[in-house]
Image: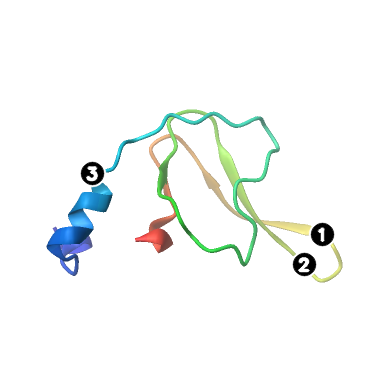
Amino acid sequence: MVLFADLREEDFELIHAPIDDLAFAAGQPRVRMGDAATSLYTLRAGMIKLVRHTVDGCQRIVRVLRPGDVVGLEAL
């Protein structure tokens, strides 16, 4: 309930929007740092690796998401 405490009545219409089943190829970026959060995802299968690129070009793994994890809460 706390997650939705600040929503207005018209906001609930957006939550009840149709849910799409999407599939992405391994290694295909979904969001890049600096992109606006526009969608909320629930991971059903596979894994997502969240990485941050360092100034020297290396990748640092920030988190690994597994089925059941939610991605994009910033979009709310």
Residue 62 placement, left or right of 68? right
Question: What is the C-alpha distance between the residues marked 1 and 3?
Answer: 40 Å
Look at label 3 and name its amino acid.
His
Image height check: is 7 above or below 31? below
Residue 65 at x, y = what percent?
51, 44
Q: Nearer the viewer, residue 73 or 59?
A: 73
Image height check: is 72 above or below 44? below
Look at label 2 and name its amino acid.
Thr
Q: Give the secondary structure at mark 3.
A: loop
Residue at mark 1: 58
Residue 8 at x, y = what percent?
16, 66
Q: How is the image coloured?
A: rainbow
Question: What is the C-alpha distance between the residues marked 2 and 3?
Answer: 38 Å
Q: How many neighbours does mark 2 have within 10 angstroms: few (below 14), some (14-19), or many (20 or more)?
A: few
Look at label 1 and name its amino acid.
Cys
Q: Earlier in the sequence, mark 1 or mark 3?
A: 3
Q: Give the secondary structure at mark 1.
A: loop
Residue 55 at x, y = what percent?
81, 71
Q: Quadrant of residue 69?
A: top left
Viewer-nearest of discs 2 and 3: 3
Residue at mark 2: 54
Q: Nearer the viewer, residue 4 or 63?
A: 4
Whether tag 2 and tag 1 are in contact, CB under 8 A, the answer is yes
Q: Quadrant of residue 32?
A: bottom right
Q: Earlier in the sequence, mark 2 or mark 3?
A: 3
The N terminus lies in quadrant: bottom left
Residue at mark 3: 16
Q: Residue at x 53, y 63 (%)?
A: 36
Residue 27 at x, y = what percent?
70, 37
Q: Residue at x 21, y 51 (%)?
A: 13
Q: Residue at x 38, y 37 (%)?
A: 68
Q: Quadrant of residue 76?
A: bottom left
